[in-house]
Image: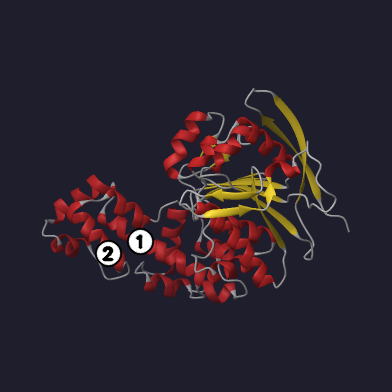
Amino acid sequence: MSLPTYLDRLTLGSSQSARVTFEIRVIFSRGKGVSHTVDLFVYPNCQLLDASGPWQVFASANTLLGRRHYDLRLNAIEPGEVTSNGGMTLVATHALSAFASTSRPSATTSPTDTLLVAGGHGVHDLDDRVIRMLAERAVSASRVGSICTGAFALARTGLLDGRCVTTHWRQAERLAREFPKIHVAADALYRQSGNLYTSAGVTAGMDLALALVAQDHDHRLAGEVARELVMFLHRPGDQAQFSEGLRCQLASHGRLRTLIDRVLNDPLADWNSEGLAESIAVTPRHFQRLFRQQLQMTPFEFLTRLRLESARRLLAESDASLTRIAEHCRIGGAEQLRRQFQRRYGLAPSAYRARFGLAGANPETRDAS
């Protein structure tokens, strides 16, 4: 039986602003026995984890499947050693140009199914020749993605024009400024737009790779890979790049920062505004003012967000009922959890669990109150 396909028109722009329209045949479904080729492009001064993290996600999927479904190939401008930003040397086995439309690959060379571009400071040093090779290479790939600042390389090809993308939070403003045709979602973990995928920095590349594994197989395999790698169970792409706790740590200082650290060490303790204010020897009114000045929220909102994060984690990683989760996380009852979760994340707890929770459990039992 033939594989279902569709044709997606893609416009690539070179540095000389010449524009060429290509048709890409994107294969959406594959038989279980069919190998899927993943080409990962690295270059001097790339971010090591942008390469090794996603690579290991696909490799672990192979291990759990008991076969080599993902054929992993490390690409560079030329085969050979590539020094990452941390000084560790990677050895590329394939040249980026080996599969471009102007080259003549051997009959035994497999085409690219997924092409990923690592990030790193070196992305800004890639010359126009390399960008043209990358653009040509993308034409033959079923899906194309970037990790972290790898989005800058894809942006230079014109691939991202008119798309909603993300990158490392520190580089989001620069990406939007240099490429005004791109809509940059600065706070997202990863974004999909058609057959194009972009992710935030470093570990978010592993979240993107998990999403691709889930797309190729199912969320159960992605969850097994996440647990194998001791990761949070497959964070959704629209989740913020920072956890609420980390965001508050970065924004706070002085006595409030010390207090935030203490709360984060035990977020589900029986905290309340009056007791927290007393612990740092300020009045409740001054305590409220400190939170608003440094964190732009009230102490109650801070505690609620932490508890909702804990509830979200339990929805994904456990079979506990909504009532038990609400009680454990000090949110009240199942109905309060539903309302607050919907307000904070834009979807019901049951919908979140259905998408990101443990596979094989009975949803009626899990969501019963």
Query: Foreground: 252 or 43?
Result: 43
**Eyeballing the image, is 316 above or below 88?**
below
Q: Which residue is mark 2?
A: 263
- Residue at (62, 30) in percent of width and height: 128
Cβ atoms under marks 1 and 2 closer than 8 Å: yes
Q: Secondary structure at mark 1?
A: helix
**Eyeballing the image, is 45 above or below 108?**
above
Q: Which residue is mark 1?
A: 306
Q: Residues within 10 Å of mark 2 (few under 14, many from 20)?
A: some
Q: Residues within 10 Å of mark 1 (few under 14, many from 20)?
A: some
Residue type, label 2: Val
Query: Foreground: 340 or 75?
Result: 75
Residue 352 in the image: state x and y as whole percent: 53, 61
Residue 174, disc: none
**295 to the left or right of 243:** left
- Residue at (17, 62) in percent of width and height: 274
Residue 137 in the image: state x and y as whole percent: 71, 41
- Residue at (57, 49) in percent of width and height: 82
